[in-house]
Image: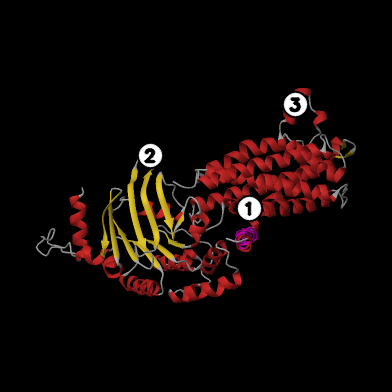
Protein backbone atom coordinates (compact mmCIF):
# COMPACT_ATOMS: atom_id res chain seq x y z
CA UNK A 1 0.00 0.00 0.00
CA UNK A 2 1.72 3.19 -1.14
CA UNK A 3 1.40 6.53 0.65
CA UNK A 4 -1.37 7.77 -1.64
CA UNK A 5 -3.49 4.68 -0.93
CA UNK A 6 -2.78 5.03 2.78
CA UNK A 7 -4.02 8.61 2.62
CA UNK A 8 -7.22 7.44 0.86
CA UNK A 9 -7.75 4.79 3.54
CA UNK A 10 -7.25 7.35 6.32
CA UNK A 11 -9.52 9.87 4.60
CA UNK A 12 -12.22 7.19 4.20
CA UNK A 13 -12.21 6.42 7.92
CA UNK A 14 -12.17 10.08 8.87
CA UNK A 15 -14.93 11.04 6.41
CA UNK A 16 -17.15 8.19 7.55
CA UNK A 17 -16.83 9.16 11.21
CA UNK A 18 -17.24 12.90 10.64
CA UNK A 19 -20.42 12.26 8.64
CA UNK A 20 -21.71 10.11 11.49
CA UNK A 21 -20.86 12.83 14.03
CA UNK A 22 -22.85 15.43 12.07
CA UNK A 23 -25.71 13.02 11.27
CA UNK A 24 -26.34 12.38 14.97
CA UNK A 25 -25.58 15.94 16.11
CA UNK A 26 -28.27 15.73 18.78
CA UNK A 27 -26.17 13.06 20.49
CA UNK A 28 -22.73 14.42 19.67
CA UNK A 29 -22.96 18.22 19.93
CA UNK A 30 -26.07 19.11 21.89
CA UNK A 31 -25.36 17.40 25.27
CA UNK A 32 -22.11 19.35 25.76
CA UNK A 33 -23.84 22.61 24.88
CA UNK A 34 -26.60 21.99 27.43
CA UNK A 35 -24.11 20.91 30.10
CA UNK A 36 -21.91 23.93 29.51
CA UNK A 37 -24.89 26.32 29.67
CA UNK A 38 -25.78 24.82 33.06
CA UNK A 39 -22.20 25.13 34.30
CA UNK A 40 -21.93 28.70 33.13
CA UNK A 41 -25.24 29.52 34.79
CA UNK A 42 -24.50 27.85 38.12
CA UNK A 43 -20.74 28.24 38.55
CA UNK A 44 -20.23 31.33 36.45
CA UNK A 45 -23.25 33.53 36.97
CA UNK A 46 -24.77 32.41 40.30
CA UNK A 47 -21.72 31.27 42.33
CA UNK A 48 -19.21 33.26 40.29
CA UNK A 49 -20.76 36.57 41.29
CA UNK A 50 -20.07 35.70 44.96
CA UNK A 51 -16.56 34.40 44.32
CA UNK A 52 -15.58 37.56 42.44
CA UNK A 53 -12.15 36.90 40.94
CA UNK A 54 -9.61 34.07 40.78
CA UNK A 55 -5.93 34.82 40.19
CA UNK A 56 -6.88 38.36 39.31
CA UNK A 57 -9.47 37.63 36.61
CA UNK A 58 -13.29 37.55 36.86
CA UNK A 59 -14.40 34.06 37.89
CA UNK A 60 -16.50 33.52 34.75
CA UNK A 61 -13.49 34.14 32.55
CA UNK A 62 -11.39 31.88 34.78
CA UNK A 63 -13.70 28.85 34.39
CA UNK A 64 -14.28 29.14 30.63
CA UNK A 65 -11.00 27.47 29.54
CA UNK A 66 -11.56 24.66 32.03
CA UNK A 67 -15.11 24.00 30.85
CA UNK A 68 -14.03 24.09 27.21
CA UNK A 69 -11.27 21.62 28.06
CA UNK A 70 -13.77 19.38 29.86
CA UNK A 71 -15.94 19.30 26.73
CA UNK A 72 -12.91 18.47 24.58
CA UNK A 73 -11.81 15.66 26.88
CA UNK A 74 -15.19 13.98 27.24
CA UNK A 75 -16.12 14.24 23.55
CA UNK A 76 -12.79 13.09 22.16
CA UNK A 77 -12.80 10.16 24.57
CA UNK A 78 -16.41 9.15 24.00
CA UNK A 79 -16.10 9.35 20.24
CA UNK A 80 -13.27 6.92 19.74
CA UNK A 81 -14.23 4.56 22.56
CA UNK A 82 -17.83 4.22 21.41
CA UNK A 83 -17.09 4.17 17.68
CA UNK A 84 -14.60 1.39 18.11
CA UNK A 85 -16.75 -0.55 20.54
CA UNK A 86 -19.78 -0.25 18.27
CA UNK A 87 -17.86 -1.55 15.28
CA UNK A 88 -16.47 -4.39 17.38
CA UNK A 89 -19.65 -5.59 19.09
CA UNK A 90 -22.86 -4.35 17.51
CA UNK A 91 -22.22 -4.88 13.82
CA UNK A 92 -18.80 -6.52 13.87
CA UNK A 93 -17.95 -4.10 11.05
CA UNK A 94 -14.43 -3.91 12.54
CA UNK A 95 -13.79 -6.95 10.31
CA UNK A 96 -13.95 -4.58 7.32
CA UNK A 97 -10.81 -2.93 8.64
CA UNK A 98 -9.08 -6.02 9.97
CA UNK A 99 -9.19 -7.79 6.58
CA UNK A 100 -7.99 -4.67 4.77
CA UNK A 101 -4.31 -3.95 4.12
CA UNK A 102 -4.33 -0.97 6.47
CA UNK A 103 -1.41 -1.18 8.92
CA UNK A 104 -2.29 -0.82 12.63
CA UNK A 105 -0.97 2.75 12.91
CA UNK A 106 -3.25 3.82 10.07
CA UNK A 107 -6.31 2.29 11.75
CA UNK A 108 -5.35 4.13 14.95
CA UNK A 109 -5.03 7.40 13.01
CA UNK A 110 -8.40 6.82 11.35
CA UNK A 111 -10.26 6.08 14.56
CA UNK A 112 -8.61 8.92 16.45
CA UNK A 113 -9.22 11.52 13.73
CA UNK A 114 -12.97 11.55 14.38
CA UNK A 115 -12.37 12.00 18.11
CA UNK A 116 -9.98 14.90 17.54
CA UNK A 117 -12.37 16.65 15.16
CA UNK A 118 -15.35 16.16 17.46
CA UNK A 119 -13.37 17.27 20.51
CA UNK A 120 -12.15 20.47 18.86
CA UNK A 121 -15.56 21.28 17.32
CA UNK A 122 -17.46 20.78 20.57
CA UNK A 123 -14.78 22.76 22.40
CA UNK A 124 -15.29 25.64 19.96
CA UNK A 125 -19.07 25.52 20.45
CA UNK A 126 -18.72 25.54 24.25
CA UNK A 127 -16.31 28.47 23.96
CA UNK A 128 -18.89 30.41 21.95
CA UNK A 129 -21.52 29.66 24.61
CA UNK A 130 -19.05 30.86 27.27
CA UNK A 131 -18.39 34.11 25.42
CA UNK A 132 -22.12 34.76 25.47
CA UNK A 133 -22.04 34.52 29.28
CA UNK A 134 -19.11 36.95 29.60
CA UNK A 135 -20.97 39.61 27.67
CA UNK A 136 -19.03 38.85 24.47
CA UNK A 137 -15.74 39.51 26.23
CA UNK A 138 -12.86 37.13 25.58
CA UNK A 139 -9.21 37.54 26.44
CA UNK A 140 -6.77 35.73 24.18
CA UNK A 141 -3.10 35.83 25.17
CA UNK A 142 -1.75 33.31 22.70
CA UNK A 143 -3.99 31.75 20.02
CA UNK A 144 -1.32 29.24 18.99
CA UNK A 145 -1.14 27.86 22.55
CA UNK A 146 -4.94 27.56 22.65
CA UNK A 147 -5.04 25.63 19.36
CA UNK A 148 -2.05 23.48 20.32
CA UNK A 149 -3.61 22.44 23.63
CA UNK A 150 -7.04 21.90 22.09
CA UNK A 151 -5.67 19.60 19.38
CA UNK A 152 -3.13 17.74 21.53
CA UNK A 153 -5.65 17.20 24.33
CA UNK A 154 -8.23 15.88 21.86
CA UNK A 155 -5.56 13.56 20.53
CA UNK A 156 -4.60 12.28 23.97
CA UNK A 157 -8.17 11.51 24.98
CA UNK A 158 -9.19 10.11 21.62
CA UNK A 159 -6.22 7.73 21.97
CA UNK A 160 -7.22 6.89 25.54
CA UNK A 161 -10.80 6.27 24.41
CA UNK A 162 -9.53 3.96 21.71
CA UNK A 163 -7.64 1.87 24.27
CA UNK A 164 -10.89 1.62 26.23
CA UNK A 165 -12.85 0.68 23.09
CA UNK A 166 -10.39 -2.02 22.08
CA UNK A 167 -10.29 -3.54 25.55
CA UNK A 168 -13.97 -3.22 26.45
CA UNK A 169 -15.86 -6.48 26.66
CA UNK A 170 -19.23 -4.87 27.36
CA UNK A 171 -20.98 -1.51 27.06
CA UNK A 172 -20.52 -1.08 30.84
CA UNK A 173 -16.75 -1.03 30.35
CA UNK A 174 -17.20 1.95 28.02
CA UNK A 175 -19.07 3.90 30.67
CA UNK A 176 -16.98 2.95 33.70
CA UNK A 177 -13.83 4.88 32.75
CA UNK A 178 -15.54 8.21 31.95
CA UNK A 179 -17.66 8.03 35.10
CA UNK A 180 -15.16 6.75 37.64
CA UNK A 181 -11.85 7.99 36.24
CA UNK A 182 -12.27 10.79 33.74
CA UNK A 183 -14.93 12.79 35.56
CA UNK A 184 -13.12 12.93 38.94
CA UNK A 185 -9.84 13.79 37.22
CA UNK A 186 -11.56 16.56 35.28
CA UNK A 187 -13.28 18.07 38.34
CA UNK A 188 -10.09 17.83 40.41
CA UNK A 189 -7.92 19.16 37.59
CA UNK A 190 -8.39 22.84 38.35
CA UNK A 191 -11.39 23.78 36.21
CA UNK A 192 -13.10 25.67 38.99
CA UNK A 193 -10.17 26.74 41.16
CA UNK A 194 -6.47 27.54 41.27
CA UNK A 195 -4.28 24.88 42.86
CA UNK A 196 -2.97 27.55 45.27
CA UNK A 197 -6.39 27.75 46.90
CA UNK A 198 -6.11 24.09 48.00
CA UNK A 199 -4.51 22.76 51.21
CA UNK A 200 -0.95 21.41 50.74
CA UNK A 201 -1.82 17.69 50.65
CA UNK A 202 -4.54 18.33 48.04
CA UNK A 203 -2.03 20.29 45.94
CA UNK A 204 0.28 17.25 45.84
CA UNK A 205 -2.60 15.05 44.68
CA UNK A 206 -3.47 17.60 41.99
CA UNK A 207 0.09 17.57 40.67
CA UNK A 208 -0.21 13.88 39.69
CA UNK A 209 -3.39 14.56 37.73
CA UNK A 210 -2.46 14.96 34.03
CA UNK A 211 -5.62 16.97 33.36
CA UNK A 212 -4.40 19.65 35.73
CA UNK A 213 -1.50 20.41 33.36
CA UNK A 214 -3.67 20.41 30.24
CA UNK A 215 -6.28 22.74 31.76
CA UNK A 216 -3.60 25.11 33.01
CA UNK A 217 -1.76 25.17 29.69
CA UNK A 218 -5.02 25.87 27.90
CA UNK A 219 -5.93 28.57 30.40
CA UNK A 220 -2.55 30.21 29.82
CA UNK A 221 -3.44 30.59 26.14
CA UNK A 222 -6.50 32.63 27.11
CA UNK A 223 -5.63 34.49 30.28
CA UNK A 224 -1.84 34.35 30.45
CA UNK A 225 -2.05 32.74 33.90
CA UNK A 226 -1.13 29.20 34.85
CA UNK A 227 -0.27 27.17 37.96
CA UNK A 228 2.39 25.24 36.00
CA UNK A 229 4.93 25.99 33.30
CA UNK A 230 3.85 25.70 29.68
CA UNK A 231 6.80 23.49 28.77
CA UNK A 232 5.89 21.05 31.54
CA UNK A 233 2.27 20.88 30.31
CA UNK A 234 3.35 20.30 26.68
CA UNK A 235 5.87 17.66 27.74
CA UNK A 236 3.17 15.79 29.64
CA UNK A 237 0.84 15.93 26.63
CA UNK A 238 3.52 14.63 24.27
CA UNK A 239 4.53 11.92 26.72
CA UNK A 240 0.93 10.74 27.01
CA UNK A 241 0.54 10.72 23.22
CA UNK A 242 3.64 8.54 22.77
CA UNK A 243 2.52 6.17 25.53
CA UNK A 244 -1.05 5.83 24.22
CA UNK A 245 -0.01 5.41 20.58
CA UNK A 246 2.30 2.61 21.76
CA UNK A 247 -0.47 0.87 23.72
CA UNK A 248 -2.95 1.16 20.84
CA UNK A 249 -0.41 -0.05 18.31
CA UNK A 250 0.37 -3.08 20.48
CA UNK A 251 -3.31 -3.90 21.03
CA UNK A 252 -4.27 -3.67 17.36
CA UNK A 253 -1.07 -5.29 16.04
CA UNK A 254 -1.48 -8.31 18.30
CA UNK A 255 -5.27 -8.34 18.14
CA UNK A 256 -5.66 -8.33 21.93
CA UNK A 257 -9.32 -7.82 22.67
CA UNK A 258 -10.07 -7.98 18.93
CA UNK A 259 -9.09 -11.34 17.51
CA UNK A 260 -9.55 -14.80 18.93
CA UNK B 1 1.97 -24.77 -9.92
CA UNK B 2 1.23 -21.39 -8.34
CA UNK B 3 -0.93 -21.33 -5.25
CA UNK B 4 -3.36 -18.71 -4.07
CA UNK B 5 -3.19 -20.16 -0.57
CA UNK B 6 -0.52 -22.34 1.02
CA UNK B 7 -1.13 -23.51 4.56
CA UNK B 8 1.49 -25.58 6.37
CA UNK B 9 1.06 -27.39 9.67
CA UNK B 10 -1.45 -24.82 10.90
CA UNK B 11 -2.48 -25.19 14.52
CA UNK B 12 -4.95 -23.22 16.55
CA UNK B 13 -5.78 -23.61 20.21
CA UNK B 14 -8.39 -21.14 21.45
CA UNK B 15 -8.16 -19.47 24.85
CA UNK B 16 -10.70 -21.91 26.28
CA UNK B 17 -8.40 -24.82 25.39
CA UNK B 18 -10.32 -26.00 22.32
CA UNK B 19 -7.90 -27.35 19.72
CA UNK B 20 -9.58 -26.15 16.53
CA UNK B 21 -6.78 -27.01 14.08
CA UNK B 22 -4.35 -29.87 14.60
CA UNK B 23 -1.68 -29.24 12.01
CA UNK B 24 -3.60 -28.49 8.81
CA UNK B 25 -1.71 -28.46 5.51
CA UNK B 26 -3.65 -27.25 2.49
CA UNK B 27 -2.94 -25.73 -0.89
CA UNK B 28 -5.43 -23.88 -3.06
CA UNK B 29 -4.17 -23.67 -6.67
CA UNK B 30 -4.40 -20.31 -8.44
CA UNK B 31 -7.57 -20.04 -10.56
CA UNK B 32 -9.24 -22.92 -8.73
CA UNK B 33 -12.74 -23.19 -7.28
CA UNK B 34 -11.92 -24.94 -4.04
CA UNK B 35 -14.52 -26.22 -1.59
CA UNK B 36 -13.58 -26.69 2.05
CA UNK B 37 -16.21 -28.87 3.66
CA UNK B 38 -16.78 -30.17 7.14
CA UNK B 39 -19.35 -30.46 9.91
CA UNK B 40 -20.02 -27.60 12.30
CA UNK B 41 -17.01 -26.89 14.52
CA UNK B 42 -14.60 -28.78 12.24
CA UNK B 43 -12.27 -25.78 11.86
CA UNK B 44 -13.31 -24.33 8.47
CA UNK B 45 -14.02 -20.81 9.68
CA UNK B 46 -10.87 -20.86 11.82
CA UNK B 47 -8.77 -21.56 8.69
CA UNK B 48 -10.45 -18.72 6.83
CA UNK B 49 -10.17 -16.41 9.85
CA UNK B 50 -6.43 -17.02 10.16
CA UNK B 51 -5.89 -16.60 6.41
CA UNK B 52 -7.64 -13.21 6.43
CA UNK B 53 -6.19 -11.81 9.64
CA UNK B 54 -9.30 -12.13 11.79
CA UNK B 55 -7.97 -14.93 13.99
CA UNK B 56 -4.46 -15.37 15.44
CA UNK B 57 -2.84 -18.73 14.73
CA UNK B 58 -1.02 -20.74 17.36
CA UNK B 59 1.64 -22.09 14.97
CA UNK B 60 2.24 -22.98 11.34
CA UNK B 61 2.49 -20.81 8.26
CA UNK B 62 0.05 -19.26 5.78
CA UNK B 63 1.00 -17.73 2.46
CA UNK B 64 -1.29 -15.86 0.08
CA UNK B 65 0.07 -15.81 -3.46
CA UNK B 66 3.50 -16.53 -1.97
CA UNK B 67 3.33 -13.76 0.65
CA UNK B 68 3.56 -14.88 4.25
CA UNK B 69 0.80 -13.41 6.43
CA UNK B 70 3.29 -12.85 9.27
CA UNK B 71 6.07 -11.31 7.19
CA UNK B 72 3.97 -9.29 4.74
CA UNK B 73 0.47 -9.07 6.25
CA UNK B 74 -0.57 -5.91 4.43
CA UNK B 75 0.55 -7.17 1.02
CA UNK B 76 -1.03 -10.60 1.54
CA UNK B 77 -4.36 -8.96 2.41
CA UNK B 78 -4.50 -6.98 -0.83
CA UNK B 79 -5.12 -10.24 -2.73
CA UNK B 80 -8.06 -11.39 -0.61
CA UNK B 81 -11.75 -10.57 -0.63
CA UNK B 82 -13.71 -12.08 2.25
CA UNK B 83 -17.39 -12.87 2.54
CA UNK B 84 -17.73 -13.89 6.15
CA UNK B 85 -20.23 -16.25 7.69
CA UNK B 86 -21.85 -13.61 9.89
CA UNK B 87 -23.45 -10.41 8.62
CA UNK B 88 -20.77 -7.86 9.50
CA UNK B 89 -21.59 -4.44 8.11
CA UNK B 90 -23.08 -1.40 9.78
CA UNK B 91 -26.85 -1.78 9.24
CA UNK B 92 -27.37 2.00 9.49
CA UNK B 93 -25.11 2.78 6.54
CA UNK B 94 -26.38 3.07 2.97
CA UNK B 95 -25.36 -0.02 1.08
CA UNK B 96 -23.51 1.99 -1.58
CA UNK B 97 -21.43 3.48 1.27
CA UNK B 98 -20.71 0.05 2.73
CA UNK B 99 -19.12 -0.98 -0.57
CA UNK B 100 -17.43 2.34 -1.41
CA UNK B 101 -15.94 2.69 2.08
CA UNK B 102 -14.51 -0.82 1.84
CA UNK B 103 -12.83 0.27 -1.38
CA UNK B 104 -11.46 3.24 0.53
CA UNK B 105 -9.83 0.96 3.09
CA UNK B 106 -7.92 -0.61 0.20
CA UNK B 107 -6.86 2.83 -1.02
CA UNK B 108 -9.36 3.18 -3.88
CA UNK B 109 -10.42 6.84 -4.33
CA UNK B 110 -14.18 7.53 -4.21
CA UNK B 111 -14.21 8.72 -7.83
CA UNK B 112 -13.11 5.23 -8.83
CA UNK B 113 -14.90 3.27 -6.12
CA UNK B 114 -18.40 4.72 -6.66
CA UNK B 115 -18.90 3.56 -10.30
CA UNK B 116 -17.28 0.23 -9.48
CA UNK B 117 -19.58 -0.27 -6.48
CA UNK B 118 -22.63 0.67 -8.57
CA UNK B 119 -21.67 -1.87 -11.21
CA UNK B 120 -21.12 -4.63 -8.64
CA UNK B 121 -24.40 -3.90 -6.89
CA UNK B 122 -26.27 -3.92 -10.22
CA UNK B 123 -24.59 -7.19 -11.22
CA UNK B 124 -25.70 -8.73 -7.94
CA UNK B 125 -29.28 -7.54 -8.32
CA UNK B 126 -29.07 -4.71 -5.80
CA UNK B 127 -29.16 -1.84 -8.28
CA UNK B 128 -32.43 -0.45 -6.91
CA UNK B 129 -31.28 -0.71 -3.27
CA UNK B 130 -28.12 1.38 -3.41
CA UNK B 131 -29.52 4.19 -1.29
CA UNK B 132 -31.24 1.84 1.19
CA UNK B 133 -29.69 1.13 4.56
CA UNK B 134 -28.42 -2.34 5.36
CA UNK B 135 -31.23 -3.00 7.80
CA UNK B 136 -33.79 -2.68 4.98
CA UNK B 137 -32.32 -5.65 3.11
CA UNK B 138 -33.51 -9.24 3.23
CA UNK B 139 -31.12 -12.02 4.29
CA UNK B 140 -30.27 -12.90 0.69
CA UNK B 141 -29.66 -9.27 -0.21
CA UNK B 142 -27.31 -8.88 2.75
CA UNK B 143 -25.29 -11.86 1.50
CA UNK B 144 -25.06 -10.32 -1.97
CA UNK B 145 -24.04 -6.99 -0.49
CA UNK B 146 -21.21 -8.76 1.29
CA UNK B 147 -20.09 -10.31 -2.00
CA UNK B 148 -20.10 -6.88 -3.68
CA UNK B 149 -18.11 -5.46 -0.76
CA UNK B 150 -15.56 -8.27 -1.01
CA UNK B 151 -15.06 -7.64 -4.73
CA UNK B 152 -14.70 -3.85 -4.66
CA UNK B 153 -10.88 -3.94 -4.68
CA UNK B 154 -10.73 -6.55 -7.48
CA UNK B 155 -9.17 -9.29 -5.37
CA UNK B 156 -7.42 -12.27 -6.99
CA UNK B 157 -8.66 -14.59 -4.26
CA UNK B 158 -12.23 -14.64 -2.96
CA UNK B 159 -12.99 -16.45 0.27
CA UNK B 160 -16.63 -17.32 0.86
CA UNK B 161 -17.68 -18.67 4.23
CA UNK B 162 -21.16 -20.16 3.76
CA UNK B 163 -22.28 -17.37 1.43
CA UNK B 164 -25.59 -19.00 0.56
CA UNK B 165 -26.71 -19.81 4.11
CA UNK B 166 -30.36 -18.81 4.39
CA UNK B 167 -30.64 -17.91 0.70
CA UNK B 168 -33.53 -19.34 -1.32
CA UNK B 169 -32.94 -21.79 -4.20
CA UNK B 170 -33.44 -19.31 -7.03
CA UNK B 171 -31.11 -16.72 -5.54
CA UNK B 172 -28.59 -19.39 -4.65
CA UNK B 173 -28.44 -20.56 -8.27
CA UNK B 174 -28.04 -16.96 -9.40
CA UNK B 175 -25.12 -16.63 -7.02
CA UNK B 176 -23.60 -19.86 -8.37
CA UNK B 177 -23.74 -18.46 -11.91
CA UNK B 178 -22.13 -15.25 -10.75
CA UNK B 179 -19.33 -17.10 -8.93
CA UNK B 180 -18.75 -19.38 -11.95
CA UNK B 181 -18.39 -16.30 -14.13
CA UNK B 182 -15.82 -14.89 -11.71
CA UNK B 183 -13.69 -18.05 -11.80
CA UNK B 184 -13.82 -18.00 -15.60
CA UNK B 185 -12.35 -14.51 -15.38
CA UNK B 186 -9.42 -15.91 -13.38
CA UNK B 187 -10.53 -15.36 -9.79
CA UNK B 188 -9.56 -18.07 -7.29
CA UNK B 189 -12.40 -19.01 -4.96
CA UNK B 190 -12.30 -20.83 -1.66
CA UNK B 191 -15.79 -21.79 -0.52
CA UNK B 192 -17.11 -23.34 2.64
CA UNK B 193 -20.69 -24.53 2.57
CA UNK B 194 -23.06 -26.98 4.13
CA UNK B 195 -24.94 -27.30 0.82
CA UNK B 196 -22.92 -30.14 -0.65
CA UNK B 197 -24.69 -30.05 -4.01
CA UNK B 198 -23.33 -26.51 -4.25
CA UNK B 199 -19.75 -27.77 -3.85
CA UNK B 200 -20.47 -30.64 -6.25
CA UNK B 201 -21.70 -28.21 -8.90
CA UNK B 202 -18.98 -25.60 -8.52
CA UNK B 203 -15.74 -26.99 -7.13
CA UNK B 204 -12.73 -28.34 -8.97
CA UNK B 205 -11.06 -29.41 -5.74
CA UNK B 206 -12.57 -30.47 -2.45
CA UNK B 207 -11.05 -30.80 1.01
CA UNK B 208 -12.97 -32.25 3.92
CA UNK B 209 -11.97 -31.29 7.44
CA UNK B 210 -13.13 -32.99 10.60
CA UNK B 211 -12.13 -32.15 14.16
CA UNK B 212 -9.29 -29.93 13.01
CA UNK B 213 -7.73 -32.44 10.62
CA UNK B 214 -8.00 -32.65 6.82
CA UNK B 215 -9.30 -36.13 6.00
CA UNK B 216 -9.64 -35.76 2.22
CA UNK B 217 -8.07 -33.32 -0.24
CA UNK B 218 -8.46 -34.11 -3.94
CA UNK B 219 -10.17 -33.17 -7.17
CA UNK B 220 -13.96 -33.29 -7.13
CA UNK B 221 -13.93 -36.20 -9.61
CA UNK B 222 -11.66 -38.29 -7.41
CA UNK B 223 -13.67 -37.51 -4.30
CA UNK B 224 -16.90 -38.42 -6.09
CA UNK B 225 -15.34 -41.64 -7.31
CA UNK B 226 -15.17 -42.73 -3.67
CA UNK B 227 -18.92 -43.03 -3.82
CA UNK B 228 -20.27 -46.57 -3.88
CA UNK B 229 -23.73 -47.19 -5.34
CA UNK B 230 -24.09 -50.20 -3.07
CA UNK B 231 -24.01 -47.97 0.00
CA UNK B 232 -27.27 -48.15 1.92
CA UNK B 233 -29.24 -44.96 2.13
CA UNK B 234 -29.52 -43.73 5.70
CA UNK B 235 -33.11 -43.96 6.96
CA UNK B 236 -34.46 -44.14 3.44
CA UNK B 237 -32.95 -40.82 2.38
CA UNK B 238 -30.25 -40.58 -0.29
CA UNK B 239 -28.47 -37.32 -0.90
CA UNK B 240 -26.10 -36.24 -3.65
CA UNK B 241 -22.98 -38.28 -4.35
CA UNK B 242 -20.79 -35.84 -2.50
CA UNK B 243 -23.15 -35.87 0.45
CA UNK B 244 -22.91 -39.66 0.68
CA UNK B 245 -19.10 -39.57 0.45
CA UNK B 246 -18.97 -36.78 3.01
CA UNK B 247 -21.13 -38.64 5.50
CA UNK B 248 -19.27 -41.92 5.16
CA UNK B 249 -15.89 -40.16 5.64
CA UNK B 250 -17.10 -38.24 8.65
CA UNK B 251 -18.50 -41.42 10.21
CA UNK B 252 -15.21 -43.24 9.57
CA UNK B 253 -13.35 -40.46 11.35
CA UNK B 254 -15.61 -40.19 14.35
Scheme by which the image is coloured = secondary structure
Q: Is residue A14 magenta?
A: yes
Place residue A164 in its image quadrant: top right
Identify the secondary structure beneath mark 1.
helix
Q: Nearer the viewer, residue A186 or B212?
A: B212
To which chain does the residue with label 2 belong? B
Q: Nearer the viewer, residue A141 or B39?
A: B39
Q: Nearer the viewer, residue B92 or B16?
A: B16
How many residues crowd around disc 3 within 10 Å: few (fewer than 14), some, or many (20 or more)?
A: few
Can see residue A35? no
**Which residue is the site of mark 1?**
A109
**At which x and y percent is residue B183?**
38, 71
How far apart in space, not on screen, are marks 3 and 1 (Cα)? 35 Å
Identify the secondary structure beneath mark 3.
helix
To which chain does the residue with label 1 belong? A
Predominant SS of the magenta segment:
helix
Residue A204 disc label: 3
Discs 3/1, front: 1
How many residues crowd around disc 2 within 10 Å: few (fewer than 14), some, or many (20 or more)?
A: few
**At which x and y percent is residue A58?**
88, 41
- The residue located at (77%, 36%) in the rendering is A190
To which chain does the residue with label 3 belong? A
Q: Is residue A142 magenta?
A: no
- Which residue in the rendered view is the most extreme toward the front? B1
- Magenta stretch: give its range: A8-23
**Which residue is the site of mark 2?**
B16
How many residues crowd around disc 1 within 10 Å: few (fewer than 14), some, or many (20 or more)?
A: some
Amino acid sequence: MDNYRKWIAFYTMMRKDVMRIFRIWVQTFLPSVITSVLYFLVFGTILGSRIGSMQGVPYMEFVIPGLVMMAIVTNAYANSSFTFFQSKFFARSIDELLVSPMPPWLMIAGFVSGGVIRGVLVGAIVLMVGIFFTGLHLTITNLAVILLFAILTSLVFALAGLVNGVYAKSIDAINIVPTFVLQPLTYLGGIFYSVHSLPHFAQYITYVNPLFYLINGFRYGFLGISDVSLSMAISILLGLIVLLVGINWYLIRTGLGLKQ
Amino acid sequence: MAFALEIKDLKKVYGNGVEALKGVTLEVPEGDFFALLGPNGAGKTTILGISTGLVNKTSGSVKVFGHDIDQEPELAKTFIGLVGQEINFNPFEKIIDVVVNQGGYYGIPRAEAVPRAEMLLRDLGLGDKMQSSGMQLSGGMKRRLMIARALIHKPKFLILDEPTAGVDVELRRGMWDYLKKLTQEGLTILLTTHYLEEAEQLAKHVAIINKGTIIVNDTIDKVLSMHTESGEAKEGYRGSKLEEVFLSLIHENK
